[in-house]
Every structure is written in structure tokens, then in C-alpha cells.
Amino acid sequence: MTITESLTLMLALLYGATQLWWAGKRFGAIAATISLLLALVISASLTLLVGTAIAIAGLALLQWRKPAFAKGDLRINDLRAGCQNLIVLSLLIVAIQYTVNSLMLKAGIADPWVARPNVVDAFLPIAGAIEVKGIVSLGLWDQNHPAAAVMLGIVLLTGLLCKRAFCGWACPIGLAGEYLYKLRKRVIKEELMPPRWLDWPLRMLKYLLLAGFIYLVVGMPAMGIPGYLQGNYHRIADLKMALFFLTPGLVTLCCFALILMIASWRRQGFCRYLCPYGAILGILSFFSPLKIRRNQQECLIDKGMKCDKCTRACPANIIVHTKTTVRSDECQACMRCVAACPKKAALGFGLPGNHMLSARSLMIGVLAIMFFLPLVAWLFGYWDSQIPDAIRMQLLQVADHIGH
Ligand code: SF4
Ligand code: SF4
């Protein structure tokens, strides 16, 4: 684990622990802090220790400069935006570190002083799915990109537990889409919504893409998995992916242009129509016990008044004000509807029986799943890639000639 990963991880987890404290869950905060200290002792890692020290200093600075954010004492939408932006910022730092590492390898430096952050394997979901298949069918644990399987499992777990909160609270592509959409709205003010009859087939596109990826993984014979995982293509799958984005061909450029157009055309356009991750999380989210729930006794409508603020606030165009439970696969648990509701107890995100979660609790849950599990995986030796830099450097020189 590199210093950037250690710092990001500890920053997110310690921030989550402080949020538990400020939310009055003192026992939980102490238990979380003890778990982190234990992880630190078990790992005996200087990198993790340095990351923890910087994270503590950063949190102290945050407490001093922005006490409201440090205490999570923010409105729902500000809390979510803060969480998304910080995750994107950490990914940007990781991306810079990865790029510098790759450029050094490309330049023939076999022992680059900037280490490769293993979290980039999160962008190899198909490799991660093949690895999971290898674990399940053959008991084979990949050592080349173990973080790919870990991150895939983590993202899917968020869908099972807290609907598409990953999309609403953490996904960098979703946030980029939101900024693009806002930019477009500055130039063209109107909403450019597709007609209802077109919206549904467009939404199904992401399920088609997902079906294609599942076909690729399921269709791969189990006996072919060891060969694939030991093959040169898999060994530099991350570099191939980076090259794909950095040196795009004409078809790729056209696809990028289409994606940008869709993302700026309608809010959450990419998530809604094209993202295969959104599709699988949408399916898993049906099983999530946590959902947006409307308390009819408290809702203004049931008191004879007119109100549809929750529906109007929803970026996914879900009709909220007439439902008691929002089951839609498009719900990203963003809680904008809850923020817009004028009656505090009328709408919430939680379990049946009016057991609602605050936005802060949801954020703590997302941070815990997304950052604690990688820490555990790392402690068990299933995070760092075992490919020596010298081999990566050699393979990178001939990357154009390496295929599936
Ligand atoms: S229903 Fe509420 S939580 Fe779900 S996407 Fe719409 S605004 Fe967000
Ligand atoms: S915004 Fe609140 S009060 Fe209004 S319809 Fe929705 S749940 Fe009911």
C-alpha cells in the first residue's frame, strides 16, 4: 500500500470515527478507533503509520478551520457534495501518482521512486469478475491484480446494503456527469428530457451492456482462468486500460463524445442509460433493506395539503410523493428528496418500521464499506500486486503487441 492509499484510507476511516463521535455514538467511535489502531499495530507498516499521522494532522486542521464540516454538521446536500468531492480529489491524486509511475516505467526506469497505487485496479471490473470466478470455481486467488476483485466486491456490497449509495455518494464519474450537466444548463437552460416512451428503452441499454460483460465472464471456461490470470495481458491490464484512454482511436473518441453528450444532455444521463455498474447496483438495490420511505401519517399530502417537493427534487425523476417506499433501481440514495421535504419526519432513508438513517450515518456506512474492507484485504495480503516493476516495465515496452 502506497503512502497516498494509506493517507486516503486513514483519513476516510478516522473521519468516519469522528463522525460517530459527533453523532453521539461514542461507543462506536471508540470501537472504530481501536480497530484502526489494531490494524496499525498488526501491519507494523511505516507507510500506514505516516499516513495515519498525516490524516490526524489533517483532521485537526479541518476541525480548526471548518468545524461544521469536521463535525458533519451540514445540510444533507452539502454533506454529500463534500463526501463526493473529497473522494474524487483522492482519486485525482492517485491518478497523478499512477501516471508518473507509468511514465517512469515507459521511460525504462525499472525501479521507479513513485510507487504504483493498487487502488487503480478498481477500474478493472471485468478482471475483478474473472478473479472472483477463479476464487469461487477453482479456489484460485489472483496475485497480479487482487485489488480488482476486492473493489468489485466492495462496490457490489454497497448496492446490497444501501441501494445505489455508491453512485450517489462516491462515484467520480457520476460527479463529473453532474458538473457537465450543470455546465450545459448554464448555456442551454431548458431541460432536454427524452419522451417517456424513449426513456425506458434507453434505460435498458445499461442492462444490455451489463449482460454483455456477464456473458464474457460466465462464458469463460473455468479451466481457462489460470492461463488468463497468469497471462501478460492480465498482468498489464491496468496499463492497457490507461493507454486505451490516453491514446484513443477514432471510434473511442466518438464513444467519448457520445458519453459526454448524454451526460450533459440530461441529469445522471450516463448513470441512467449507459453505466453497467449502475445496472448491477440497480439490480442488487432491490434487495437492500434500506430504502427511501414516506411516513404517511406525517406527510403533508395525507393532511390534505398539496406537496410534491420530494418528487421535484429527485434527479432520477422518481415519483416519490405518492409512494410509501421507493424501490426504483434508479434511486441513488442521494437523499435530495429528504432534504427538500418540509416535514422532518415525513420522509427518510431507512429500514421498515420508521427506523431512519441520518445522512451522516449513511455517509459513515459508505466510508466504512469502501475504506475499511480494503484495509482488511491488505492486512490479509490480498491487495498489493505481486508483479515486479521490472516485469511491468518490460511488458509496457511491448504493450501494443500483447492481446487477450
Ligand atoms: S428518490 Fe430520493 S434518494 Fe432516490 S434518487 Fe430520488 S432524490 Fe435521490
Ligand atoms: S416533500 Fe415531504 S411532505 Fe411533501 S409530499 Fe414529499 S414526503 Fe410528503
Image (spheres, helix red, strand yellow):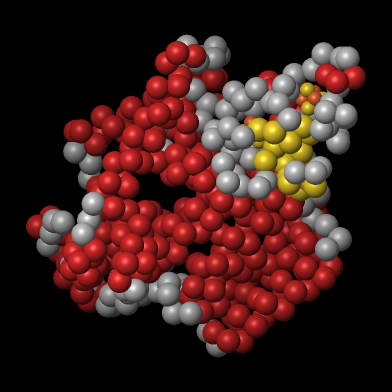
Viewer-closest of 296 and 147: 296
Quarter of the image where one finds residue 109: bottom left
Viewer-closest of 221 and 181: 221
Q: Is residue 368 left or right of residue 3?
A: right
Image-quarter location of ligand 1? top right
Rendering coords of residue 123 (x, y %): 38, 54
Q: Is residue 41 visible?
A: yes
Quarter of the image where one finds residue 212: top left
Q: Is residue 112 left or right of residue 265?
A: left
Residue found 63% across the figure and 62% down from its top: 368
Q: Is residue 386 above or below residue 295?
A: below
Q: Is residue 300 above or below residue 283?
A: above
Residue that lies at the very extreme toward the right in this rendered image: 303
Residue found 59% across the figure and 38% down from its top: 332
Residue found 24% across the figure and 63% down from its top: 222
Q: Is residue 123 above or below residue 44?
A: above
Rendering coords of residue 266 (x, y %): 49, 23
Rendering coords of residue 180 (x, y %): 49, 30
